[in-house]
Image: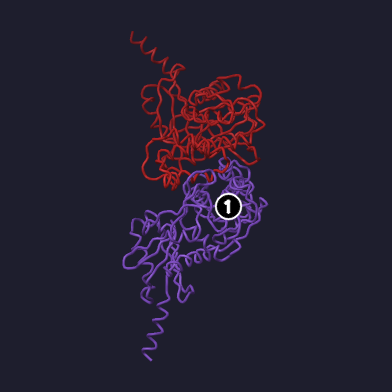
Chain colours: A purple, B red
Amino acid sequence: MADGHRALVGTVTEAARVLCDWGSTRLRAFLEVGGIVSDRRDGPGVAVAGGEPPARILASVLAPWRAAHRLDRVFLCGMAGSRNGLVEVPYVRTPAEVQAWRRGARRAPAGDIEVSVAAGIATENFHGAPDVMRGEETQIFGALRLDRQLARGCRLIVLPGTHSKWVLVRDAHIARFQTCLTGELFDVLCRHSSLLRAGDGLEAGEEGFEAGLRAGARGDLLASLFEARAAQLIGGRTPGWARAFLSGLLISAEVAGMARALESTAGEVTLIGEPALAALYLRALTDRGITAHALDGDRCVLAGLHELAAADERG
Amino acid sequence: MADGHRALVGTVTEAARVLCDWGSTRLRAFLEVGGIVSDRRDGPGVAVAGGEPPARILASVLAPWRAAHRLDRVFLCGMAGSRNGLVEVPYVRTPAEVQAWRRGARRAPAGDIEVSVAAGIATENFHGAPDVMRGEETQIFGALRLDRQLARGCRLIVLPGTHSKWVLVRDAHIARFQTCLTGELFDVLCRHSSLLRAGDGLEAGEEGFEAGLRAGARGDLLASLFEARAAQLIGGRTPGWARAFLSGLLISAEVAGMARALESTAGEVTLIGEPALAALYLRALTDRGITAHALDGDRCVLAGLHELAAADERG
């Protein structure tokens, strides 16, 4: 009986693995036991770790799981592979398909754990300038795994966020992409500019967002930005209205600018991201007559990390 | 001899007056003796005064001059007339000509000095949204005093700065204007965003500025902004290049956005501002085939404060 119980525990323990999306602002770690996500823990992003060695942060996030399971491998994507991450993983260049990306991963010790860290992707953007991603490629390869339709022909995938990515996928290869500063700019303007008066709240958010969407389509972003301030100074608007206006304005300006750049790309757009954010982008795209559908970002990143783990476990 | 000397000093003292441009970030005070600027002193802006009462800041800036002169009147424009300034002066609404603007000024005691503070102007911008200026109207009325040609017909005047103003002047009236966040956004991005890596210097500034000018004309500002970061990450560019790129990008995007908004406005553009900054805007305008000439911002603000002082001394 005692041996039987120990064998059972041993079996469960054997199948446990950890999948991590470690970005600039947040570490999200998923524990999979028997192929099923059974727990999730968050930690600080690579950019906000405040000088603490990444291996130590990872160890402390994993500690409760290690007490209960034998975790012999951890799979990571995102800024974990940057210069300030666990191990610097060179970028794979476009056009990049999933095999080349998997081969680009690096194994490394992190304290007493062995980790596999995914490569980022480097490209020339739609204007021939250099551009990079770390993390979004994992969501994209995950989406291709989840929806085989996406792997056929030419597709435009948009991943909204701190640094939004507009990605052309051609025959299952990441062909080319461009990054927009949208999320970071929203954050910097809310925290450090003169655009929002003291006070906050979300009153009139819907109305402000709509007004921002309309303004963003005009193509004079630097002028429209100031309207957020003037609306509070003499237009009777609240900081909540202005904050929503900024959100709508920036999303709409991103979509307008990129839609112009990508006029040649017909067909439906695939959004990958956090559902509430993807919903805002869906509205901005629909306003321009662009058809789109959204995939959940967490599902995609887990599917992408499964691609990484499957290759690693085979190799 | 002694009496003759005292009489001479008395005459000089009688004619001394102080003209101030008190903006968000800086106070610039000019001492005029016998109609000629004989000294200049700077102080903190209204937004950076750190809670010190504006009247006390003004008194300390003027103190050395008061030791030598009898200053019975001080004329101010800019944020001195805002809620956080010396005295809140209501906005004059467009269309606004110089007489209505002068009537809008407020006299007030500031400690033991009497001050006259100019009104700002409120408008509906080119999209019908509220917009405001405090200080630029003084430069504009000064420019109209210096160059009577500007007072005829329809003119487009651009005042680059923290909050750039694009102003339609029709038959010597400020008819309508729009503000762009350009200068503030440049500052906020340089200090608070991920776009500039550590290190600085002005190496490759010219090349970066040119690249920024080209990128800004494309109409996808949020995408172009990220190029500053990627150029340092994998393009071998320095922080100095990237800083100049951002400057060229934002100026060019401002000009492109406003030129689209103002397609109907033919004719030469008048720039009013600090000469080094105006030179950058001249290049961006010329790149778009727009003819422009520049007037010195200090000369214009002094001429505008003369308009204010003349009315006041008559009244």
Give whichever of B154, B143 is nearer the camera: B154
Question: Residue A53: x and y, percent?
Answer: 33, 59
The secondary structure type at the circle numbered 1 is: helix
> For the view shown, which residue lies furthest in the bottom direction?
A1
Q: State the quadrant of the N terminus of chain A.
A: bottom left
Question: Residue A57: x and y, percent?
Answer: 36, 63
The residue singled out by tag 1 in the image is A244
Give whichever of B120, A99 is nearer the camera: A99
Question: Residue A184: x and y, percent?
Answer: 49, 50
Question: Does the image show residue A65?
Answer: yes
Quarter assignment of residue B137: top right
For image coordinates 48% across by 48% down, the residue present is A131
> For the view shown, which residue lies furthest in the top direction?
B1
Above or below, comparing residue A33 to residue B289 in the picture: below
For image coordinates 43% across by 53% down, the residue present is A91
Q: Badge 1: how crowded within 10 Å, few (<14), some, or many (20+)?
A: many
Above or below, comparing residue A313 to residue B244 in the picture: below
Above or below, comparing residue A53 to residue B10 in the picture: below
Q: Along the horizontal axis of the image, is B77 left or right of B169?
A: left
Q: Chain of mark 1?
A: A
Which amino acid does the dot numbered 1 rest on?
Ala
Above or below, comparing residue A283 to residue B175 in the picture: below
Q: State the quadrant of the C terminus of chain A.
A: bottom left
Quarter assignment of residue B308: top right
